[in-house]
Amino acid sequence: DETVVELYSQATIFFCDVVNYSSLRDKLSPVEVMKLLNEIYSSFDEIVEKYGIYKVETIGDSYMAVAGATDKMYPQESAEKIALLAIDVVKCVENFKSSDEDKISVRCGISSGPVIAGVVGSDMPRYCFFGDTVHTASRMESSSKEMCIQCSSTTYDLLNDAPNYSFHFQERTKSIRYECPSTKDCSQTFWINDASNRMRSSLRATPDIENGDMIQGLLEQPWNKVGKSKETLLPISLGQSFMTSHVAAILEGRMNLVLQDRNPSLQLSELVRSQIRDFVSEIIARYNKVEYHSFEHAFHVTISMNSLVETLAKAGKRSEPATEGIYTDISHDYFMQFMLVFSALIHDVCHLGMSNKMLESLDHDVTKKFDGSTAERNSIHVTIEILNKTKYRQFREVIFPTIQDKIMFSKILFWSILCTDIATSDRLNKCKDRFNAINSYIECLSMNQEQEDKFDPNLCPAIDYIDDLHDLLDLSNTQLEESKERFIINKSNLERCVVSEHLMQVADVAHLTQDWETFLKWNLRLYKELMECHKKDLMPDPSNNWAPGQIGFFSGYVIPLAERTEKCIGKIKGLSLAHYAQLNKARWETEGERISEIFINGVEKGECENVILMKCYCSENVPLLDADESAPLSRDLICMINTSSNDRR
């Protein structure tokens, strides 16, 4: 049979052996040696599982593991995990005594680089790793010292950029000759002495291979600049690896805040953090490659939601807002903050780029599963099915350790996702009814009018989906019966529900309340997606009414939503949602016809997105300004745009 091999461009290899193995072998019987090695290597196996890396094999007294090959992770992260494994292995051995009171010592070696892997043998096949990196890691171990960890310069460089830990090194004074078949050069090596958790923002993201320097900038962007690069007018188009690592880091940070709120001594384990990253990757894989309802849009919604809750949290620390909102406790409601970001991530999972009405007209399979809000309920079901997998057990236990937490998880999830079905007028009107109910209640209280903490039970958006909750969250009948009162709409529930819905609806259309260029990017993508639906005879040609249609959407939905949201959370500095929406509407009233024509012609000719957008930004009659309305386009950029726009002339 043909041998199948795999090439991994960047992995980190770990070797460890028992220093005094020969003397142990001389004084102990073979059975005693095997028993001793089994005890110590079983302890190593637990550490390997803790960090979610791959144990390759044990041969005699040698133990081998690898990160960054069979699992998908960044080089800095794989090096970090292996280094932490080595540190824990040494600490484990320091405290280790066999059942016969035998003490042992080990030495460890680490190297990073490309490896080749494949299954070797037929009767007893083994998955083996080959290459200079393996040879070098083995050399790092054999030339190491008792109870020490030696790493190559390639691993040293990666660990200096490790995402979560600062490593304490000591340069080895004596150079080690690697003697690899392809290199045979001398290179400096380093001792890894210890590691300490970085003092960093809990929401700082994992460094990305290509975009690591951009992550912190994204976190610090003001609301109207979210997703906008400082270097170019074009909104950032990020690689999937960057978006994946960034979303995972945000979820990790938010979950850490939840844990520390429950118990200040708690922190996410490496296992749970690994599960979060795997969960995010699996969610992303379920997004379809459509023009608008894609993962890139979900990413923008997620970082916009994170910006919203982070702004609210900071305002709470500054004792803002000056004007009280409906539910200002969100500034320190860490579980709700986590759930809103979580919901933003998954809200369009499996979206097909078609409205619920279109799906019904096609009698699509998904419409047979759900009666109403088809796409939204499907997203919830797909997400819960993934989360319920055995491999995410520890992640689930961290999110909802109790039945009460599980119920709150389900409520916020249903509140946040169902409200995004804004094409269903009944659902949208119910959202407004809930807002009006709690807003009137609070206004009456402010005028010292006594109010009964009781509302129409039909206001609860999750009440119709109790059976879904029962099945999805594996609640027993007893647990469900005991928890029904938690779905009763009282003041506390209604406040949380209304704020959840409004923040989610704002994040879902965030581009309309942000920078002009960001608005145009997503407006173009929506137009392209709807044109695809038109080509399938699922809707009339959207180009016939595109310009006035956007004005109607601003006036009828976006601006009223922004104004209600500001009442929900209070007026907060830097979060002028209605103001930015009105600016975009006013500018569209001036330029919308011209831009719509550019959209229509550009899509018809098959022009790439950036060319179409650059044409939109360039106007011979209207000077192009940025969101502050103070910085016109540079002459060089206008020349560049005009060069690519000859067909317009």
Image (cartoon, rainbow, N blue to C red):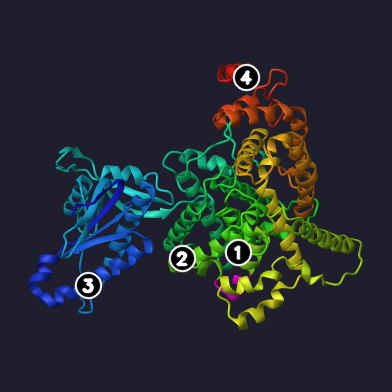
In terms of sequence position, does the residue under pointer 2 or pointer 3 come before the other? 3
Q: CA distance from mark 1 to mark 2?
A: 29 Å
In terms of sequence position, does the residue under pointer 3 or pointer 4 come before the other? 3
Dot 2: what SS?
helix
Left or right side of 424 for 410: left
**Amino acid at pointer 4:** Arg
Left or right side of 648 for 320: right
Q: CA distance from mark 4 to mark 2?
A: 54 Å
Q: CA distance from mark 1 to mark 4?
A: 47 Å
- Does the magenta stretch mainly form a helix, a strand or a loop? helix
Left or right side of 235 for 209: left
Residue 456 % position (x, y): 81, 70
Query: Mark 3, mark 4: which one is toward the viewer?
Result: 4
Read off the residue under disc 3. Answer: 38
Range of the magenta residues? 401-407
Q: CA distance from mark 2 to mark 3?
A: 28 Å
Query: Mark 2, mark 3: which one is toward the viewer?
Result: 2
Report the quarter where the N terminus lies. bottom left
Q: Nearer the viewer, residue 425 or 163?
A: 425
Q: Nearer the viewer, residue 410 or 39?
A: 410
Question: What residue is at 83 percent from the left and 59 percent from the top?
Answer: 436
Question: In which quadrant of the rendered view does residue 274 lie?
Answer: bottom left
Read off the residue under disc 2. Answer: 392
In terms of sequence position, does the residue under pointer 3 or pointer 1 come before the other? 3
Report the quarter where the C terminus lies. top right
